[in-house]
Image: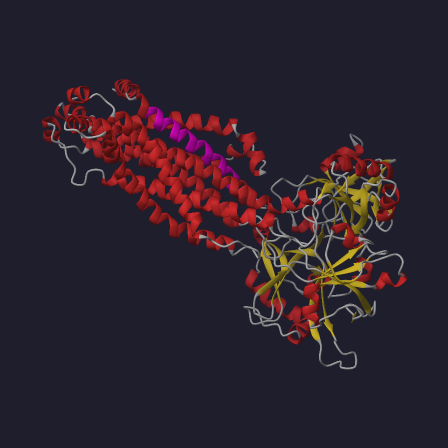
Amino acid sequence: MLKNYLKIAFRKLWKNKVHTAINMVGLAVAFGSSILLYLTASYEFSYDTFHKDADRVYCLYFNSADKAGKPEYSAAMAYPLTPVLKTEYPEVEAVTSYSWGAGELTYQEKKFEKNIQTVDADFLKVFSFPLLKGNINSALADKNNIVISKTTAENIFGKEEPIGKQVLVTLSNEKVPFIVTAVIDDAPKNSTVRYDALIRTEKNPGYEPIKDRWTSQNHQVYVKLAANTTQANAEKRFESLVNKYMKTSEEEAKKAGRLKNARGQYLSLLMMPLKEVHFDEITGWGSGMSKNYIYTLLTIALVIVLIASINFINLTIAKSFTQAKEVGVRKSLGANKVQLFLQGWGEAFMVCIVALILGLSLAYAFLPQFNKLFDSSLSIDNFLIPDNLIISLISFILITLIAGGYPAFVSSRFNIVQVLKGKLTRKKPGALRNSLIIVQFSISCILISCTLVIFTQLKYLRNKPLGYSKEQVISVPIGNALNNQTAVQQFRNELSKYPGIEAVSGSQINFGNGLDGSSSRSTYGFDYYPNASDTKNSKSILTDWVRVDYEFIKTMGIKTIEGRDFSPTFGTDSTALIVTESMLKQMGEKHGVDKFLMPDSAVGKQKIIGVIADFNLYSLRRENRTITLEMAPKGRVNYVLIRTGNQNLAESMNLVKNTWKKLAPNEEFKGSFINENVDRWFNKEERLSQIFSLAAGIAIMLSCMGLFAIALMIIEQRTKEIGVRKVLGASVSSIVNLISVDFLKMVGIAFVIATPVAYYAMQKWLQDFANRTDLNWWIFALAGVLLVVIALLTVSYQSIRAALMNPVKSLKTE
């Protein structure tokens, strides 16, 4: 019996090759694209879940509010915090600081550039990274111990035993000896915390001067709570810590006119669950991967499958009415509803299973391109995870039951008498079909509108003036390859002989996202006294603080409003400042030159020598702050900036690269043009635009395939009507209009439904940007026009073909 059912099902599917092909191709594309999107979302949600006690591990952050009550967040912590938590708060089982860093490891004259993180002794207790060699309690017990990753051990020692060996780590241009005490497994790709080697926090070059200062905050802190402690209880207990050790910060907030936060405090020390750190968008220390982005991927995967399923349901139900006599005959011969349902569902299952195999093949074939396009690192192993296999299997069964089961259920309930008399009718012919078509095109319209809005916002961000000239400027990360105090002058000396080089300078912070992947932000808050004799009336100043080298303004092409650039001609420039125009507004001054600021009492008063136009030092997602520039002859300048007047950019880059090889022959060159760095700011929006474009394309293709098949079927059913109309004198255009107008009405309804949904969704999305474009009406109008044109082109082919058909043949059609 089963063999007979399969044979009949195969014959029916083969007989209706066009509809079978449309269903199979549509489902295959839907399955393939949805599998890739689901695996991407699943991978992102897997970050940091592998730790044994991940539910008890948290990252600390501060919450405050500005003068308008707008919340502000920071994950930068002070060095005294960790020992206080460890000794005074029993709720904390283990605690560790964590600071990103890059350093040079040397072993027997071999040098290796590695990511060396500074942590506390409890690091291996907070995180459960497998320890391959060594003891968890003694691995970081001494300040001169170093723990290296598996890959680092293989790179440096090969097959040699690493434990007990001495390596040299370059810290502040000095090689410091460390003893290897443990080898830790490499951090998985889905880990927020990454490392090549671990050393104690006390060895951080900037540790000693600020180890007891609560106001100097420059690293993250992770805590592991005791098993009997909740997050809410711990945060409540931390209120006493803020009151005891950070009273100065609260007093400064009051004095500056800041409001209390949502918890009724000027400053709160809160905890972010480890599993949420990957999605951290509020403190600026996370990856910036929004959960909304992941939910968008899942939603797109769902709607693509939904559109393909709608096609399947529409075509199968429509075809079932043309094959109703077969059902009537089967019923008259004794077939019951269950048997008819299983027969219909079996045909659908055959189509779905073939489509799934094709979809998996498509997903596997396009996996490399997908990874490249969306900056992912998926592999076939991600699909073979038991949880993903189970979810995929359940989803497939549900899809086949809904997409194939409903049409089978409808056909199994046909009235046998009406079927055999050829009088099968429905109360509302086409109501379900039309509703499903409207749903399809509503989804397509939403995706088109979202794609256009994202594209418009991306164009707006790319074209927005940044306040500096980003073209023809090369940024070179110094790292530990050169002395940070002399690197800029070394480049200046080497490049001065080339007429194409216009200016050379340096900066503590890079412009855009460079190839070294590093980013940082230094913010100063202090009081400004307009009148030195009046110590009561002060203004609260908050500014981004950047240390730079000579010729910075010239190199970056920033407009000078007042005063001058830093110059070696003036010996006093070592303590001088340059401020942006908005800084003057904070100070309440019309002119800034010769005014004095005292951001740090240890340094003393610093004179302003220049005022420059505002410029965007950070991503346009963020709200731009005032900027203060300081000369850094003794400070850390991390990037050399080179402006070239040579129009041959490749030649200029090669010149800078050769200079680097001369100064640091054994180190990798990571120089890049600043305009490329700035473009990387928009990688997230670029990927989102590509995802929506791809999803909209797939949705439109599937919708048009379904519309094409439905139009074909309706024309087949109205062949005689079309023949009669032609005999009676109907023109080709009137017949095309007759067939097309119903579909265009449905597209119009879809546009009306989709537009407010797309408008609301994009309005919420744009709120994440400090700089954003307007939601213009023409964007949604254009989406509607595109939808109408696409639908009209899809239907017109069949409509014109039917209108041109010989009426004699039409009237002979049964």
Q: Is residue 494 above or below residue 231?
A: above
The part of the chain drawn in magenta is 20-42
526 displayed left or right of 810: right
- Tell me the quarter of the image containing the N terminus: top left
Q: Nearer the viewer, residue 711 or 37?
A: 711
Q: Position of residue 771 (x, y in %)?
A: 57, 56
Q: Quadrant of residue 223?
A: bottom right
Residue 455 in sight here = yes
> Residue visible at 23% across and 41% down?
431
- The residue at 57%/30% (across/down) is 368
- Residue 276's place in the image compared with 417, above or below, is below
Q: Is residue 774 left or right of residue 518?
A: left
In the image, residue 477 lies at what x, y percent?
77, 45
**Residue 222 lies in what quarter of the image?**
bottom right
Give the dominant element type of the magenta stretch: helix, strand or loop: helix
User: Up-down: is 476 above or below 84?
Assistant: above
Report the side of 211 relative to 430 (left or right): right
Task: State which quarter of the image contains the C terminus.
Answer: top left
